[in-house]
Amino acid sequence: MTSRERVNAILAGEKADRCGFWLGMPHPDTWPIYLKHYNTTDEEVVRQALGDDIRWICAEWQSYKHPEGKLLWNTTRVGITGVGPVFAECEDVNEVEDWDWPNPDYLDFTAIVERLRSAGDVYRASGMWTCFFHIACDMFGMENYFIKMHTDPDVVHAVTRHICEFYLEANERCFEAAGKEIDAFFFGNDLGTQLDLLVSPPQLEEFVMPWTRRFAEQGHAHGYQVMHHCCGAIHKIIPAFIDAGIDALHPLQAKAANMDAETLARDFKGKIAFLGGIDTQDLLVHGTPGGVRADVRRVKSLLGPSLVVSPSHEALLPNVPIENVIAMAEEAQRF
């Protein structure tokens, strides 16, 4: 099978020739180590050498081209107490409506579509990153955001609506431009800490999950599979992701509470595909290649065959030895 066929089958719950593998998106400080090891200046050479099945070509970064150079998301302004989050002190929905929100007319996906077309026969994940929960956190300040869910829910709903309506339109334009060059709509919002959710399930159900469902529906309406990135201890809301139609969950933060492969397999195997799961907090940093291989075999035995092996945090840091990365990639591809 080609990489594209393989990952499509895995996420669809169909038979593939083996588990998939995704290197992730190594930190910029990490790439020189990999490039030197493979004696190349081309990151694609490294990915091919490791047998990487997926290319994430995010449509969000560098696609917003405001004629005055404005950022896509301006989340700070000068207020009564100095420079701070835009809506930290907001109690009036009219203030939200009057804000200078991004204009999708300034989006240009030409370069993204070209990258997708030239990616080769690999599985292509794209779309806007659509991190509406994080944008709202920045616009309120995280503590204010969580408090205002209780004290000023109308304001929170209004801000979230503006953010998400922009993303819906932006994704629509991206998907129309890219068409079948995309295999999966990949978007993300981190909702967990190491121990639990950032806010309670009722708050997530009110302020986050309705939009998560809308975005999953949007991806499926264009014929794409849907991959959702959500770090932390999110076990409590995985059923909601399944109900929303998410095809694959990423990155499976292995050391977070109830996110170990045994628990995920027991509770959710066969209901959703898994992408990630190889611990970057301890194992890949401090382990040996033999230990990494053993853990990849363990995770495959528990979560396979609907599994793409990948680090539990996609931005691999320089403290992960290249030998452990190679061990992870090779073991992932063993039959």
Image (cartoon, grey):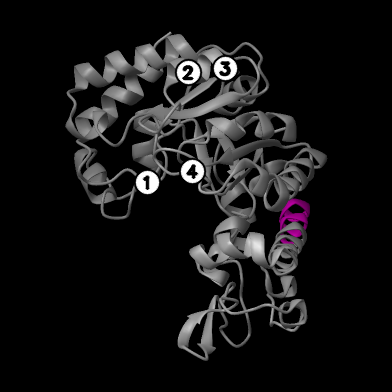
Highlighted range, magenta = 170-177
Question: Which image quarter is the N terminus in?
Answer: top right
Give the image location of residue 289, x and y in percent. Answer: 20, 22
Residue 182, quarter of the rendered image: top right
Q: CA distance from mark 2 to mark 4?
A: 16 Å
Left or right, 217 with reference to 151:
right
Q: Amino acid at mark 1?
A: Ala
Per the image, the residue denoted by label 3 is 267
Q: Which residue is mark 4?
A: 192
Q: Residues within 10 Å of mark 4 (few under 14, many from 20)?
A: many
Of the residues shown, which amino acid type is indicated by label 4?
Gly
Contact (Cβ within 8 Å) of mark 2 with mark 4: no
Amino acid found under the numbered disc labelled 3: Asp
Q: Nearer the viewer, residue 69 or 48?
A: 69
Answer with mark 1 or mark 3, whichever residue precedes in sequence: 3
Q: Earlier in the sequence, mark 1 or mark 4?
A: 4
Front residue (pair 320, 52): 320
Which numbered disc, 2 or 4, marks the residue that appears first in the sequence?
A: 4
SS assignment at label 4? loop
At horizontal 62% and vertical 65% (from top left) the residue drawn is 148
At 41% from the left edge and 30% from the top edge, which residue is drawn?
257
Q: Earlier in the sequence, mark 2 or mark 1?
A: 2
Q: Can residue 99 be seen? A: yes
Looking at the image, is mark 3 or mark 4 earlier in the sequence?
4
SS at mark 3? helix
Q: Which residue is mark 2?
A: 263
Mark 2 neighbour density, 10 Å: few (under 14) some (14–19) many (20 or more) = some
